[in-house]
Amino acid sequence: MSLAAPIVIRPARLGDALAIAALHHVAVHKLAAPFYPREVLEHWSPPVTLTGAERRYRETQEDGGLTLLAEHDGGLAGFGVVIPEAGEIAACYVAPELSRRGIGRTLLGAMEATVSAHGVHEINVRASLNSKSFYSAFGYHVSGRGEYRFEDGTVMVVAFMRKDNSPIV
Ligand SMILES: CC(C)(COP(=O)(O)OP(=O)(O)OC[C@H]1O[C@@H](n2cnc3c(N)ncnc32)[C@H](O)[C@@H]1OP(=O)(O)O)[C@@H](O)C(=O)NCCC(=O)NCCS
């Protein structure tokens, strides 16, 4: 189903941190729930606090991450994090009630354009199992199976995915 209002992409600010964290939480616990045990979901996205949200936002920036927001009808509809110099898509999350309307596609396109603008043409993503079909739809191929280990040893299985984003000459 398409959206009535346009999707607007803009860079995030610190003041968006809480809304980003809240969207992350609901997207993980609704959209990824069929793919992971509850303990993994709880580590991946613990309960949201303002302090935690702002800390995470600052850490993302310190790691070279650019956070892009997708807004629809004046509200936050999704966000993505890209590390352009590393050619890495570090996050792409969409509000569950707006999924399958092209918001992820728009965010991913904006992140890929940012990577290309930095002269980097290979893009990598550590994809959650629930998002593999999404990345596959845009030309990403699985290059390996990975494991993310949380501090207490809980393991989250992910797929390493890669795309050659070289310009067509
Ligand atoms: C993955 C995610 C970002 C996709 O966002 P979205 O806005 O629903 O995606 P789009 O509507 O742009 O989908 C574009 C295409 O991707 C594919 N796709 C997206 N979600 C899919 C799914 N669950 N199953 C199969 N294909 C899917 C389809 O080809 C789709 O096109 P179609 O709807 O015309 O068939 C969203 O489901 C999400 O936030 N998931 C939870 C968070 C997460 O795990 N993020 C990835 C972290 S690496």
Image: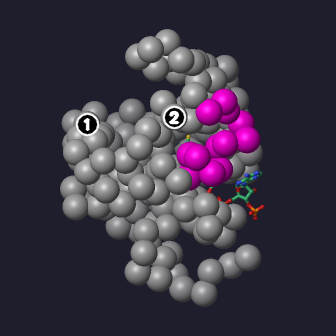
Instruction: Pick the residue in front: 44 or 2.
Output: 44
Task: Please report the residue visible at 26 percent of the width from the left and 51 percent of the height from the top.
Answer: 50
Residue 14 visible: yes
Image quadrant of ligand 1 equals: bottom right
| Residue 39, image x, y percentages | 57, 28
Q: Is mark 1 within 8 Å of ligand 1?
A: no
Q: Tag 1: Cα neighbours inside 10 Å, few (<14), some, or many (≥20)?
A: few
Task: Please report the residue visible at 47 percent of the width from the left and 50 percent of the height from the top.
Answer: 24
Task: Specify the farthest residue to the bottom.
Answer: 4
Instruction: Pick the residue in front: 116 or 4.
Output: 4
SS assignment at label 1: helix
In the displayed structure, 118 sits above or below 76; it is above
Q: Earlier in the sequence, mark 1 or mark 2?
A: 2
Q: CA distance from mark 1 to mark 2?
A: 20 Å
- Which residue corresponds to mark 1? 59
What is the quadrant of the N terminus in the image? Answer: bottom right
| Residue 44, image x, y percentages | 49, 34
Q: Give yes or no for residue 37 being in the magenta stretch.
A: yes
Q: Is residue 65 left or right of residue 125?
A: left
Magenta region: 27-38
Q: Is residue 92 left or right of residue 33?
A: left
Name the magenta segment's main secondary structure: helix
- Which residue corresponds to mark 2? 42
